[in-house]
Image (cartoon, helix red, strand yellow):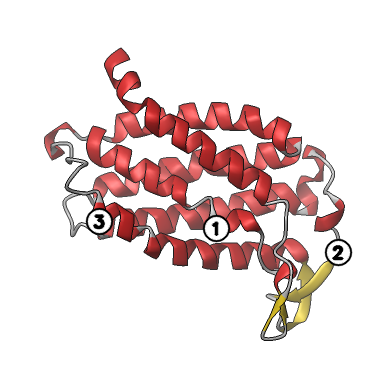
Amino acid sequence: MLNTISRTLPFVALMTLVVVASNFLVQFPIPGTVFGINLADLLTYGAFIYPVAFLVTDLTNRQFGPRAARLVVVAGFAIAVAFSIWASTPRIAVASGSAFLLAQLLDISVFNRLRRSSWWKAPLLSSLLGSALDTAIFFSLAFASPFAFIGANDDFAIGSAPILGIVAMEAPRWVSWALGDFAVKMIVGLVMLLPYGAVMSLVKPMPVSEAA
């Protein structure tokens, strides 16, 4: 057990860095317009950072197996939430922690089931499913009014806007953020296949017989 912990410490450190950074940056909408679309109603900077967490989880799972990956997720979760309470707001920390833990555990389960498939299927499908769950849980808990008992919304989250900045129907601003966030996560998930494929020869896969 101690040997597993020592070997996964770099992954825990990287996971913590990714989650704390994304928790902080999710509070800052991207300014400017593209094709007449107000980016502030669509994206936050955190959307580009968080998907890296799935890369860290998948590389850990590939090399050390699902048990070690869960250890990295739980350790990263505990440390990241503690830092996030200081770096952001309590409500963001609660939302991020809940979404992170459930999404990463789903990622681990899907990756482990697909580890015998083509090299790209396990990391791609596990990260996409995990990202969908993460987006749904995080934005609901962080910004939706039914969860206001967790904490008040910051001023930047109050109000409504056209969905995705282009649909005439208006919705709470966080709905567009959630849709934009998931779209970015899908794109970044595809891009993350490049570093994953690049280090496959260095990160030897755990024997399938040991997966659990």
Quadrant position of the N terminus in the picture: top left
Q: Nearer the viewer, mark 3 or mark 2?
A: 3
Name the amino acid, label 1: Phe
Q: Position of residue 167 (x, y in %)?
A: 71, 83
Answer left or right for 193 relative to 142: left
Q: SS for tag 3?
A: helix
Residue receiving disc 3: 197
Residue receiving disc 2: 159
Q: Where is residue 26 in the image (x, y as percent from the top left)?
A: 67, 52
Front in this rendered view, residue 129 or 193: 193
Q: Position of residue 24 (x, y in %)?
A: 67, 44
The reply to whether callout 1 and callout 2 are in contact (CB within 8 Å) is: no
Taking 195 as reference, is 5 above or below it?
above
Q: Where is residue 200 in the image (x, y as percent from the top left)?
A: 21, 49
Name the amino acid, label 2: Gly
Q: Can residue 1 be seen in this view?
A: no
Q: Which of marks 1 and 2 is in front?
A: 1
> Which image quadrant is residue 66 in?
top left
Residue receiving disc 1: 48
What's the distance in space between the residues labelled 1 and 2, CA to CA?
24 Å
